[in-house]
Amino acid sequence: MSHTDAPLLSVTGLRKSFGDNVVLDGVDFSVAPGQVVCLIGPSGSGKTTVLRCLNGLEAPDAGVVAFADGQRHDFAQPARGRAAKEQRAALRDRSAMVFQQNNLFPHLTVLENVIEGPVHAHGVAKDAAIAEAERLLARVGLAEKRDAYPHELSGGQQQRVGIVRALALAPDLLLFDEPTSALDPELVGEVLLVLKELADEGWTMVIVTHELQFARQVADEVVFFDDGVIVERGHPRDIFTAPENDRTRRFLDRILRPLED
Amino acid sequence: MDTDTWHLILTSFWPMFSAGITVTIPLALISFAIGLVLAIAAALMRISGNRLLSGIARFYISAIRGTPLLVQIFVIFYGLPQIGVRIDAYLAAVIALSLNVGGYAAEVIRAAILSVPKGQWEAAFTVGLPRATALRRIILPQAARVSVPPLSNTFISLVKDTSLVASITVAEMFRVAQNIAAFSLDFLVIYIEAAFIYWLFCLVLSFGQDRIERRLDRRVAH
């Protein structure tokens, strides 16, 4: 993957506080088309908030989010009312989110979950949306589950439906918020496999994850967060084998060798 | 019991039962339907974030829950004519009962909406649904499931509360019972019989409630 491409997304000076709690304290990063960026770091370091800001689920206090085609949001001048609504809609047109707890709609079937956005938000004809949903479900091995309800599926299957629901929005950018953290260990693999296939197909992805082995294999870039700032970033080979920063090294040690001093 | 008493029970059953079927139950159904619309509106106003709308809803709910239903019925039927608003007894009953159910059910529905996890709103937003569509297509159907048991209880209470409109001359079941009792002077027998018929209605309704809940459970397990 060439890192010299013009970035699909660039984020500069992103700041967000909840009351006195500074969650993001000036975050800059960019994502090239087709690139897979993994955000790692301790809990509460701000990784998830970055994704939520990109998807319009949180309004940053400051910072600029810009896309390759010129769409640009400067949060230093907060949008209000209708403008805020349009800003959130514009951001959501760009990206689709996969949640840690999958957040599938429990009263809708798998198929209905997948076509909800295309049909009821984006005006896609129902037949076309169903055809696309069936194609995507088949791709993650869930074709025969189209009429099942979420509670009839395993956690791994639910999360694969969550991924398909995001794919069906045909976003420029896929955002994953710890997609395997809520899963039983034996179900993690099937979800990571889907993520890896998406990466191989050239999807642009930003993944918040604690699966360092996965990040090492799939990421083009790993970004290490701590205390609301990016401490270190680089190719996974470099970050994982020769971290430059002490905080990165300590974090990796804790995760990779939890029983050692 | 002597044969006269048995005769009275048998001959009074049908007038009371048929008043129950043709007046009490329709009155409860109509008031419940209108009350539900009021309740949803009041619940949405309460959670809207708009201080004025929320304040109006809060006032309505507080006034309804803080005053006796009988007083509300009297205000509408006996009070309003004094300021020139003359309504017939049946309509007054529907208005009073609807407003009353609306106030109680509003809190049930508000709690049900708030019980839907925040992640459901976020997932609805993330697939592009605007707030109103998210509410209608994602949140309310889930809130409806949660609110079936408490709303069924509200409905069963309402069926019994319709007996209060006997006091404004609506010929519902209890009014019929009062007329028969006044004529026969067998208060104990007639009023126990009336109580028994209300009980019968409520048993049938709670059986219906069970079935609805079981059917909803099959679709959405929690």
Image (cartoon, grey):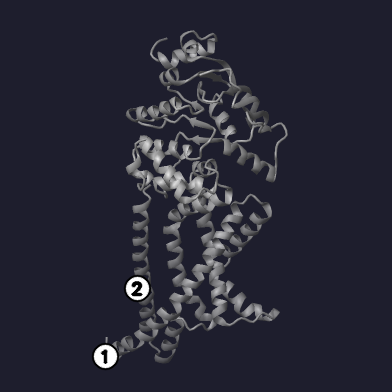
Q: Position of residue A75 (x, y in %)?
A: 68, 32
The reply to whether residue A155 is in sight is no
**Secondary structure under the numbered disc 2 in the rendered image:** helix
Give the percent coordinates (x, y) of residue B216: 37, 56
Q: Position of residue A223 (x, y in %)?
A: 54, 19
- In the rendered view, does A226 fall on the left or right side of B179? right
In terms of sequence position, does the residue under pointer 1 or pointer 2 come before the other?
A: 1
Q: Secondary structure at mark 1?
A: helix
Indicate the position of residue A194 as horizontal and vertical percent values: 40, 30
Identity of the residue drawn at 41% across and 25% down: A196
Above/below status of A40 relative to A242: below
Crowding near the residue tagged with mark 2, few <14, some 14–19, many ≥20 C-alpha atoms within 10 Å: few
Looking at the picture, tell me which residue is in the foreground, B5 or B204: B204
Q: Residue at x 42, y 18 (%)?
A: A217
Q: Is residue A45 visible?
A: yes
Camera-side residue: A66 or A22? A66
User: Split into 4 quadrants, where in the image is the N terminus of chain B?
Assistant: bottom left
For mark 2, what is the residue?
A: B200
Name the residue that disc number 1 marks.
B3
